[in-house]
Image (cartoon, rainbow, N blue to C red):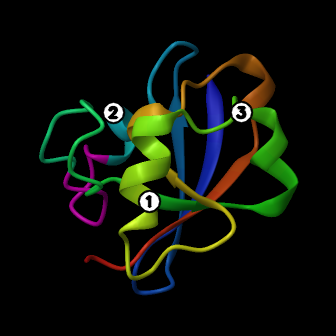
Amino acid sequence: MIQIKVTDRFGDVHNVEGEPGDKLMEVLREFPWGVEAICGGMCSCATCHVYVDEAWRDKFDAREIDEEELIDFLDHKQEGSRLSCQLHLEDEHDGLSVTLAPEE
């Protein structure tokens, strides 16, 4: 299991678990405080926007063009902005720390 520390939109911290091979979005949409993920992981809505903690940013592949273009249009984009539907969890992500971005 991969342990993930998630700070929700109210500043509350939750410790959740994911499986290797899961998309982070799949884990986060299961909680009432989690992401909406309206498009179901198709990288077309940005309702799964998160901020990846600086220490973890280089542990994921770089953004592809579709993700980059969606993030560019977000009002709340930051340096660590990612769409959680594009973040595939692996064993090396154990201890990952993310914050849910405000809803757009």
**Which residue has dot 3 on it?**
60
Which residue occupies the extreme bottom position in the image?
Answer: 10
Element carrying mark 1? helix
Residue 86 vs residue 73, the one in the foreground: 73
Mark 1 — residue? 71
**Three-letter amino acid code of the residue under disc 1:** Ile
**Local crowd at mark 3 within 10 Å, few (<14), some, or many (≥20)?**
some
User: Going from the N terminus, do you reach mark 1 or mark 2 first?
Assistant: 2
Quarter containing the C terminus: bottom left
- Counting from the top left corner in percent of width and height, residue 85 is at 39, 36
Q: Secondary structure at mark 3?
A: loop
Q: Is residue 41 visible?
A: yes
Of marks 2 and 3, the one in the foreground: 3
Q: Could you say which is closer to the camera, residue 21 or residue 19?
A: 21
Residue at horizontal 64%, vertical 29%?
2
Distance, label 1 to label 2, CA atoms, is: 19 Å
Q: Circle 2 sits on which residue? A: 26
Image coordinates of residue 10 in percent, x first then y, are 41, 86
**Could you tell me which secondary element the residue under label 2 belongs to?**
helix
Closer to viewer: mark 1 or mark 3: 1
Magenta stretch, residue numbers? 29-36
Q: Residue at x 62, y 22 (%)?
A: 1
Q: Amino acid at mark 2?
A: Glu
Q: Position of residue 68 (x, y in %)?
A: 50, 48
Q: CA distance from mark 2 to mark 3?
A: 16 Å
